[in-house]
Image (cartoon, rainbow, N blue to C red):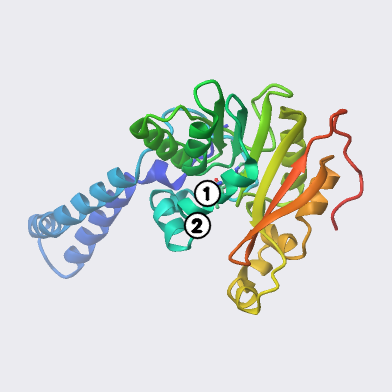
C-alpha cells in the first residue's frame, strides 16, 4: 500500500504561501485588490521557480504502489544522488570495483537490491550481456523513476521494480548473484534479518551475494568523520562489525572480505549453500 508522501500535497504549498502573503498585506492595510496584485507580482516568479524545481526533480515511478518498509528511503535526495556519490568518491571507479568482486559472467541473472538510481545495475547489465538479465529494485518511487529514465536514455537492458528487500516479488532460486550496496545501514536489525533471508530465498543454491557497507574502521580519521552515523539505529551495528554475523545468521556461508574502499567501506562476498539455506538462530546482538 502506498504511503501518502509530502510530494502528494506539494501543489498546496504555493497556494498556501500566496494566501499567507495576501493576509499579511491586508494586515498592513492594503485593499483586497492591491494585496492580490502585489502578491501576484511577487508570487509569480516564485511559483515558476517552484514549478521548475519540482519538474526537474521528477520523475516518480508512475502509478505503481510503493511498498511499505521500515527501511530508510532517501527520496528527497534522489535527483542529486548520483552527483553526491561522485562528490563523495563513490563514482564509476567504486561501482567498477563492485563489478570486479561480483565477477559477473555472460548470461547470469543478477539482482541489485536497493539499487537507488541504478548506476551499478546498468553496469551489471552490460557485464552479463544480452543472454543475461539484471533487475534492480528499490522501495523509493523517485529513485525508480530516475533509474528507469537513465536506463532508457542509455539503452540499457537493466529493468527496475518497486519493491522492498523484506518481501521480494521474485521466484525462489531465480538469480545467480545479488548485490546489496550501501543498503544494510538503511535497515533496522529486523529488516536486515528478513531481507537477507529473502535474498537467500531468491538466489539459486551456490549463488553469491556481494555486500558493500560500513564496517569497523582502522582509520582514526574515518572513525571521526563517520562518528555521527555510529549513533544512528540502523547503522550502529555495522560499526560494531556485525554485518558478517547477519550474513551467517541468514544462512550464507563462505563469508569473506574481498576489499575495502577508502578504509571506510568493506566488500563482502557470501555464498548460498548448495544444500538449501538453513538459517542459524543466534541473533546478532
Ligand atoms: C545509500 S542508497 C544506496 C543505493 C545504491 N545501492 C548505491 O549503491 O548507490 C540506499 C538505498 O536503500 C534503499 N532502501 C531503503 N529501504 C530499503 C528496503 N527495505 N529494501 C530495499 N532497499 C531499501 C533506499 O531507498 C536507497 O535507495
Picture coordinates of residue 63, whole percent (x, y): 44, 27
Q: Which residue is mark 2?
A: 90
Q: Is residue 19 left or right of residue 245?
A: left
Q: Is residue 253 left or right of residue 136?
A: right
Most foreground residue, 209 or 184: 209
Looking at the figure, which quarter contains the C terminus? bottom right
| Image height of 280 relative to 21, above or below | above
Q: Which residue is mark 1?
A: 95
Picture coordinates of residue 45, whole percent (x, y): 15, 55
Picture coordinates of residue 117, whole percent (x, y): 46, 43
Q: Are marks 1 and 2 in contact (CB under 8 Å)?
A: yes
Mark nearer the N terminus (1 vs 2): 2
Q: Circle 1 sits in a helix, a strand or a loop, which is it? A: helix
Report if the beta carbon of the residue with label 2 is closer than 8 angstroms to ligand 1: yes
| Distance CA(mark 1)–CA(mark 2) | 7 Å
Looking at the figure, which quarter contains the N terminus? top right
Report if the beta carbon of the residue with label 1 is closer than 8 angstroms to ligand 1: yes
Residue at position x 51%, y 27% in the image: 129
* Label 2: few (<14), some (14–19) or many (≥20) C-alpha neighbours in 10 Å: some
Most foreground residue, 174 or 42: 174
Amino acid at each position: 500500500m502506498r504511503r501518502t508522501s509530502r510530494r502528494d500535497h506539494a501543489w498546496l504549498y504555493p497556494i498556501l504561501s500566496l494566501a499567507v502573503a495576501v493576509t499579511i498585506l491586508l494586515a498592513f492595510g492594503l485593499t483586497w485588490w492591491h494585496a492580490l496584485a502585489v502578491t501576484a507580482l511577487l508570487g509569480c516568479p516564485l511559483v515558476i521557480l517552484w514549478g521548475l524545481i519540482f519538474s526537474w526533480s521528477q520523475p516518480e515511478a508512475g502509478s505503481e504502489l510503493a511498498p511499505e518498509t521500515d527501511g530508510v528511503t532517501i527520496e528527497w535526495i534522489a535527483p542529486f544522488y548520483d552527483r553526491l556519490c561522485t562528490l563523495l568518491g563513490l563514482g564509476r571507479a567504486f561501482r567498477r570495483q563492485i563489478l570486479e568482486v561480483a565477477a559477473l559472467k555472460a548470461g547470469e541473472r543478477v539482482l541489485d537490491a536497493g539499487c537507488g538510481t541504478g548506476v551499478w545495475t546498468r553496469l551489471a547489465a552490460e557485464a552479463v550481456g544480452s543472454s543475461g538479465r539484471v533487475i534492480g529494485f528499490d522501495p523509493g518511487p523517485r529513485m525508480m523513476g530516475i533509474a528507469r529514465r537513465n536506463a532508457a536514455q542509455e539503452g540499457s537492458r537493466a529493468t527496475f521494480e518497486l519493491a522492498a528487500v523484506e518481501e521480494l516479488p521474485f521466484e525462489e532460486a531465480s538469480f545467480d548473484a545479488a548485490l546489496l550496496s550501501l543498503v544494510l545501514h538503511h535497515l533496522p536489525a529486523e529488516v536486515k534479518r528478513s531481507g537477507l533471508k529473502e535474498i537467500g530465498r531468491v538466489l539459486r543454491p551456490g549463488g553469491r551475494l556481494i555486500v558493500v557497507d560500513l564496517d569497523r574502521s582502522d582509520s582514526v580519521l574515518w572513525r571521526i568523520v563517520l562518528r555521527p552515523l555510529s549513533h544512528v539505529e540502523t547503522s550502529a551495528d555495522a560499526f560494531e562489525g556485525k554485518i558478517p554475523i547477519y550474513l551467517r545468521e541468514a544462512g550464507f556461508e563462505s563469508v569473506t572480505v574481498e576489499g575495502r574502499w577508502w578504509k571506510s567501506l568493506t566488500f563482502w562476498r557470501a555464498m548460498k549453500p548448495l544444500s538449501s539455506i538453513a538459517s542459524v538462530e543466534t541473533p546478532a546482538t
